[in-house]
Image (cartoon, helix red, strand yellow):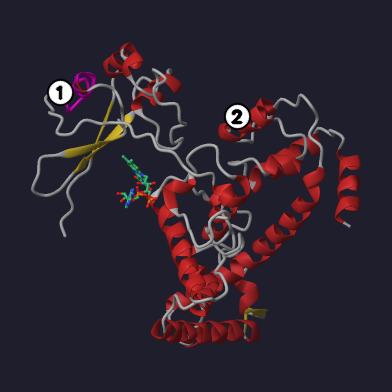
Amino acid sequence: MEQLPCWITQTTRRTHEIIRANLHRSPLYAGRIKGTGPRYCPSIEDKVVKFAHREAHQLFLEPEGRHTEEFYVNGISTSLPYEIQLEFVRSIPALEHAEIMRPGYAVEYDFFPPTQLRHTLETKIVGGLYFAGQVNGTSGYEEAAAQGLIAGANAALRAKNKSPFVLGRADAYIGVLIDDLVTKGTEEPYRMFTSRAEDRLQLRQDNADQRLTPKGFGVGLVGPSRWAAFEQKMSLVRECRSVASSTKLRGARIDHLFKRPEVSYSQLPVEIQAVAPAEIWELVEADIKYEGYAARQAQHNRELLKKNLQRIPDGLNFAEIPALSSETRQKLSQVRPSTLGQAARISGVTPADISILYIWLYKNSLGLATAIEAAEIEIN
Ligand SMILES: Cc1cc2nc3c(=O)[nH]c(=O)nc-3n(C[C@H](O)[C@H](O)[C@H](O)COP(=O)(O)OP(=O)(O)OC[C@H]3O[C@@H](n4cnc5c(N)ncnc54)[C@H](O)[C@@H]3O)c2cc1C
């Protein structure tokens, strides 16, 4: 179908002046709304204040439909009064004569601390009551849908007296999301990021069905026809793997050749390619290419566990660690954890951040040896 264009424009100095002059009328800035806003979709008031040096902010004009003249202005969410909205909207190139059909507004909502939940998303206090979505402190469509799936499946399993359905951190992003929520809680609307997962080389879209279809089948979420298709696919995958490990090209095994970045299944002789459709070869090739890295990551994660007792010196200036994101530096400076383990439990601090912090302490020889010895004793 023919697509409609989506346009780009930007705010101007005048837009920012109007907003700055009226900040006291924004419920978020006047203190009438006290909650922490979503970090990843800030209001235009937030952007003008926090990025005061920016002279313009990019906006997208998204058509609302084929049979309307309405556009959604993506990038100026606001809680300023209507007349101020009209004034600043008209200070934006292309919108000088715009009419506002529905003004922007702010919603403030509360949540139940998700540390009160089990990994099945059942509340610990009231058996049989399950929570999913924004009520658990998350923000986002996928975040809500992922929890809904797990809470719904577990409610049904409980009603049937069957074992619960829990995905681990190494199984799926859903596992990372729920484990973060129920063990760390959240201080601000929680968003899922690939960086929150320590096994992210394994959590790929191309192997999602291999990771999850057997589990889904086990609890009745995957029906017989999908299961049959999956089994058929897996038998082809096994066949390709066996051909790749038993066939040599130019003196080297195909599975060894696949580890090289420049080698692709499309270079295989046609009779070998004919063993399975291209998408199966693609999958086998990706799996082999990632294998070494994924194993290294798993080893790294095991070592990291041991390092949890590593002490962080009092008064360490986290702002000096350039490789950390500003979000992480801000959180570490607020909480001032005294060990790496404590830092890892701060909501929003990722396993990758802990690695960076560890390396930084190591490079600056901040008392590592004794701490690691202590950690070894504790773990053994
Ligand atoms: C303006 C705006 C823009 C957003 N943009 C994005 C975006 O671009 N991408 C993104 O991923 N996320 C976005 N979000 C966040 C996302 O919409 C929410 O986090 C997500 O929809 C929450 O889903 P939920 O099922 O937990 O809650 P909801 O979708 O709020 O569902 C709760 C439902 O419960 C019903 N309900 C409430 N009380 C009762 C009751 N007593 N009895 C019966 N029913 C009741 C409500 O009517 C509602 O239908 C946006 C949110 C807003 C407000």
**2 or 1: tag closer to the N-terminus:** 1
Q: Badge 2: how crowded within 10 Å, few (<14), some, or many (20+)?
A: some
Of helix, strand and loop, which one carries label 2?
helix
On the image, numbered disc 2 is attached to which residue?
A: 330
Q: Is residue 71 left or right of residue 307?
A: left
Task: Looking at this view, name the residue that lies furthest to the left.
Answer: 67
Q: Is residue 263 visible?
A: no
Residue 280 on image: x %, y %? 47, 78
Placement of the N terminus among the 4 image quadrants: bottom left
Residue 316 on image: x %, y %? 75, 27
Residue 183 on image: x %, y %? 63, 50
Is 248 situated above or below 18? below
Q: Badge 1: how crowded within 10 Å, few (<14), some, or many (20+)?
A: few
What segment is highlighted magenta in the picture? 83-96
Is 94 situated above or below 217? above
Q: Residue 96 carries which label?
A: 1
Judging depth in this view, the residue of 63 and 219 nearest the camera is 219
Three-letter amino acid code at the position of disc 1: Glu
Task: Looking at this view, name the residue that lies furthest to the front.
Answer: 126
- Select label 2 or label 1 by which is in front: 2
Residue 355 on image: x %, y %? 70, 45
Placement of the C terminus among the 4 image quadrants: bottom right
Three-letter amino acid code at the position of disc 2: Gln
Q: Which residue is drawn at 62% across and 76% down?
A: 255
